[in-house]
Amino acid sequence: MSKYMIIDGNRVEFDDEKNILALVRKAGIDLPTFCYYSDLSIYGACRMCVVEDEWGGVIASCSTPPRDKMVVKTNTPKLHQHRKMILELLLAAHCRDCTVCEKNGKCRLQELAHRFGLRDIRFKNTSEEVALDTSSKAVVRDPSKCILCGDCVRMCNEVQNVGAIDFAHRGAKMVVTPAFGRDLADTNCVNCGQCAAVCPTGAIIVKNNLKDVWKALYDDSKRVVVQVAPAVRVALGEEFGLPAGEDVMGKIVAALRRIGFDEIYDTSVSADLTVMEESKEFVKKLESGDNAYPLFTSCCPAWVRYAQTKHPELTKYVSSCKSPMEMFGTVIKEHFKSRDDAEDKTTISVAVMPCTAKKAEAAREEFANNGVPDVDFVITTTELVKMIKEIGIQFNELEPEATDMPFSLYSGAGVIFGVTGGVTEAVIRRVVEDKSQQVLKDIEFLGVRGLDGVKVCELPIGETTLRIGIVSGLGNAESLIQKMESGEEHFDFIEVMACPGGCISGAGQPFSHQPEKLRRAKGLYKTDKVAQIKRSEENPLMMALYEGMLKHRTHELLHVEYQADNE
């Protein structure tokens, strides 16, 4: 016989729901929360989700498991007053410059204040004014907007294993801060921005670079060239009411042209370059007999930063390939060099990325030529949404347009870089000898696909079987590294992406939960499915680049040597 609870007088059956909150939502009731996030541990601090039991007791629904025949109410005078008081107290200690806040319209505190009809705050804000922390290239911290929900702390510590921020002090003096009050840039922060992704207010936001991009666009002496990462196409449409996972790349190109970009390209092109170079590096490593450590991918700058700070001994095993964004940045600057001189212009390279760590990557000295960055500015998916809305483009009404020549050809292997396992699958397509359609389909079932945080697959190559690890989320990467270093596991190749699920879940994307992430992943695989070119080596543009611009210069233009953080 099935178990059930009585919620507001209605019988609701339950099976594997881990808390009352899940059951309440299953019953169609949206209980308000701040500190509850399904991918994080239960914290139970905000007390907004409390329910009343049949004896008048008030319990937190997020941290209480359901019990058979339990009776609770979600809406009573006591609970209503309780929630309004919590909101009023939070607002009393909160900066109220909502109209100029980056989170305006998407702030959970603002949303609930409106929902509960709070129009007047009886209490004076006695909080000390604290300066913004703008030291990071990726995010901005505003302590005056922090409500101590702990989402950012748990994300940074539990999921990412970085620990750049935590709670400090007690009682009314409690704050979320880096250790000893340091600036975020002076910590081991990897710039993944996942703290900003889960922050319900504007306490941590993604750094905005739109002012610099608009300035370049309005300067006639500048040629502004833009590249768009694969994961952007399956998420941007959500901000305009389109389903998650719908490929809107054609509309994005049309919007970018109307905004004023001179040349528009798809980063999937340089993802193909990355496959060519990384697979060559992988085969060379295998032939050398050096199997003490696997070859780690280098596409994710947050992972590279993590390796440098937490595991300097692994840095020399991180692929020397530049990330696709930086490869394309180099190619773009090389391509326009002669035209810049002839036309007396300066090429400005802009990248639209799902990732906040790309902002920090673009600023690294390794990716500059004579002090000039290969990628001048990085904006996120949500920043591009702001540009589209700012000038009034009716995105849904745009007719799709194509990217520009000469960099307009890319393979499906380049597109799937945006999801965890995509880099691995693209490399496998390159290194297997059998290029038949059947083998291409078989690769899908090796274990490379899916949003699991850790995936392991084995690939027979001749008389050798290669063992491949695929991880997303730096906490999962740490677990795999520990098993590898203890001798419990052995790998020949490991793909690491800092954001759980890969770039589709980047902090620069519209906020999403697991169902949306799954649809985004399916969207990329669907685009790959209909792509005429399935493997990077089959892309004729690759041969043209290798015979032209890259001839005898591949290492100079496409590779970088990362140093351990203590060197």
Image: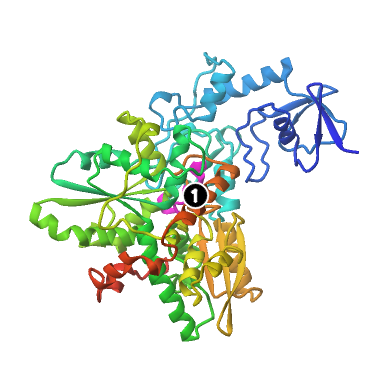
> How many marks do you count on the picture?
1
Q: Secondary structure at mark 1?
A: helix
Closer to the camera in the image, 328 or 434 = 434
User: In screen coordinates, is 85 left or right of 5?
Assistant: left
Q: Which residues are magenta?
A: 185-197
Q: Residue at x 49, y 81 (%)?
A: 286
Task: Tell me the residue that label 1 is attached to.
Answer: 504
Q: Nearer the viewer, residue 112 or 553?
A: 553
Location of the C terminus by quadrant is: bottom left
551 horizontally vs 415: left or right: left
Q: Is residue 448 shown in magenta? A: no
**Left or right: residue 191 compared with residue 342:** right
Does any portion of residue 340 appear in the rendered image? yes
Vertically, is 472 above or below 243? Answer: below
Q: Closest to the observer: 190 or 341?
A: 341
Residue 393 in which image quadrant: top left
Image quadrant where one finds the N terminus: top right
The furthest residue to the right: 1
Residue 61 in the image: state x and y as whole percent: 73, 33
Residue at 48% in and 72% down = 435
Q: Residue at x 70, y 27 (%)?
A: 28
Q: Position of residue 483 (x, y in %)?
A: 63, 70
Say what amino acid the circle numbered 1 marks.
Ile
Task: Residue 564: give x, y in percent of width and height.
Answer: 42, 69
Left or right of 82 on screen, residue 180: left
Q: Who's the residue at 53% across and 57% down the image?
A: 420
Crowding at label 1, few (<14), some or many (≥20) Cα neighbours within 10 Å?
A: many
Residue 179 shows in the view: no
Image position of 518 with respect to 430: above or below = above
